Image (spheres, rainbow, N blue to C red):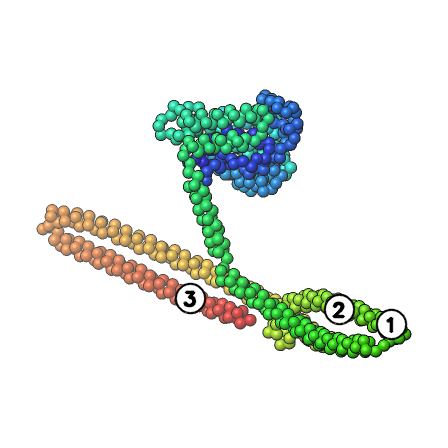
Amino acid sequence: MERSRMNRASSSRLSELPQRVESNRMSMVYATPQSKQSFGKLNIPKPQSVTSERRTSFFGSRTSGAGMARNSTFGGTEKMKDPRPLHDKAYVQQCIRQLCEFLSEKGFPGSMSVKSLQSPSTKEFLKIFEFIYCLLDPTFQMPTSKVEEEVPRILKDLGYPFVLSKSSMYSVGAPHTWPQVLGAVVWLMDTVKIFCSMSDQDLLFADFSDGSTEIEDGVEFNKLFLDYTAETYNKFMQGADTFDEEDADYLAKLKRLYNVDEGLLASMEEKYRMLSDEVERLENESQTDRLMVKRTEKVKLQTDLQKLQSYRSNLESFKANLENKASGLVEELEASGLQVETLKQEESRLQHILSTQKFTPADIERINWEKRELQQTINSLSKSLEQAEQHMWNEEIALAKAKETAEVKLAEYHKLARKLKLIPVSAENACGHDFEIRTSTEYGPSTMVQCRTQIQQLLRKLITDVDEECSRLTDMKLSLEESIEQVNSNISDKANDLKHLREQIRRLDEKLEQDMQDIAHEEQKWSAEMESVETHRKLLEKKVTLGYDESVEQLKAAQQQYHLVLQETNEERRTVVNNLASVLTTAANHLSIVEKFLEDQHKRVDRVYTDAFREDEVDIQKMKDIMEGFIAKVNSM
């Protein structure tokens, strides 16, 4: 909640007013851990401050004298350099994503994606510019002529602090012009966001709202905010660029106003940090296979253990050598001690002789000369001993360096052998031979030469085997190529055979189609005959009906005459009756004959059609058998 209160204070600095010096003070927007939309502002690195004489703002130039006030009028004479990293690809991609999200959120009528915004055309840019500017001025319409002059003029009128050249409007999507144009569009987008935010907040009439509004729209917040703005603006006009004390004082007043609990905020931040770390750890664990990680760690630990064991064995051998040398030195030291004791006894004996006997000056001179000779011998022997120790130390150092070099070369050899799958003995190319060279201090030159000779012999044998295998594979390849050529020739022959079979099948299909057409033609002929027979039958029925009607009429007339002259024409009546009976019998017989003829014709047609259909089925079955035989032959080939 406090984040939204602080955000109102931070919105007083418009996005088109870049901070001219880098400041590490806490921003008012991030005063509390709560989040609120910051109008899509980007993480733009703030430009470094220059000397006070060269500081320039698009509010106006600043005088070089200390303590002089700023010029508060607009229209500075110097061009302001764009501090945004517009040539940084990551920053450009961030701007493109933000612009795409803004257009989608505001309901851009066209289809727009991040890919299409990588290098848009001038027409697409004008549509985007017109859409965004209409959010500020709904009555705006893009002119049809001199667009390259109108767009920079509109941006300049809105207060865009940087220069957008006319030439950049001719090729908007070019790699050298699109970043500057994109920066202007993003600035216009931020302006629209701030405009919408300020219009929604309605700061001027906050005191006259109803009781449901938040406390930050009240008199206390407005008073604090106006005091903070006035104080910082006065400092700004006096030449200050940072307002750490004012920010701290304003933040403390806001905390007192809203009763902010610092301890609770700190505990919540610590809890949030711990939860974030736990989530990141769980995500990392979920993305990786823990069993594989443990197995990898196990292999690494086993490798380290082997290295430590080999190093331990080397140290033990080196320790044994040092102990041997130390035992030799102890023996030499004991021999030297015995010699010293003997010399002391001789010295005491000679001293006793010197004390008991009388010496002549010549004897004393001789003794002194022998003493000097012995002292020189002792000095020369001491120097020889020091030189021998120094030589031994140098030899040990050289030996250690040679041993390190040998170990490096041995490691390279083992690495190459593992890459060639020669190590260990169970490797693919080892063939049961041991190509590994083990380090040991007991190896002498002869042993190393023997090991080298053995490995070289094995490698030569392996090379010979590989060459023989290559020659065998080459011969196999040639034989396979010949087989492939033979198979290809067989395939071509079979293809020709298949082509002939297809031609025969096509001919059989044509023959079958011709037979089907003939059968259809015969069926049409039989249908025509059936129609003619049916027509003839109908005509006969019509004639019979007409004759029957005439007979009925005659019967009626005869009946009438019969009633009139019954008694006179009995003989005639019988005659008429007989005649009529014979006519009806004849008609009935004729009708039965016609029906029998039609039935015989229908049976004959059905029998002919059935026989023809059976013959056609037999022919079709034969053709299917022939086709199946051809297909079986083709498949067997």
User: Which circle's residue, 2 or 3, is located before the other in the chain?
Assistant: 2
Amino acid type at image mark 2 = Glu
In this view of the protein, which residue sits in the foreground, 78 or 622? 78
Residue at 10% x, 50% y: name it: 566
Q: Can residue 321 be seen in this view?
A: no
State the image coordinates of residue 490 (x, y, percent, origin top left): 61, 70
Q: How crowded is mark 3: few (under 14 residues within 10 Å), some or many (20 or more)?
A: few
Residue at 12% x, 53% y: name it: 570
Nearer to us of marks 3 and 1 is 1
In this view of the protein, which residue sits in the foreground, 244 or 279? 244
State the image coordinates of residue 362 (x, y, percent, origin top left): 90, 74
Amino acid type at image mark 1 = Trp
| Residue 255 appears left or right of 73 | left
Figure quadrant of residue 188: top right
Label 2 residue SS: helix
Examine the rendered structure and indicate whether residue 141 appears above or below residue 483. above
Can you identify the residue that label 1 sits on? 369
How far apart are labels 1 and 2 at the CA level?
30 Å
| Quadrant location, the C terminus | bottom right
In this view of the protein, which residue sits in the foreground, 363 or 305? 363
In this view of the protein, which residue sits in the foreground, 426 or 210? 210
Residue at 38% x, 63% y: name it: 609
Identify the mark at residue 572; answer none if there is no mark. Answer: none
Can you identify the residue that label 3 sits on? 617
Nearer to us of marks 2 and 3 is 2
Label 1 residue SS: helix
Q: How crowded is mark 1: few (under 14 residues within 10 Å), some or many (20 or more)?
A: few
Identify the mark at residue 389; answer none if there is no mark. Answer: 2
Figure quadrant of residue 584: bottom left
Label 3 residue SS: helix
User: Which circle's residue, 1 or 2, is located before the other in the chain?
Assistant: 1
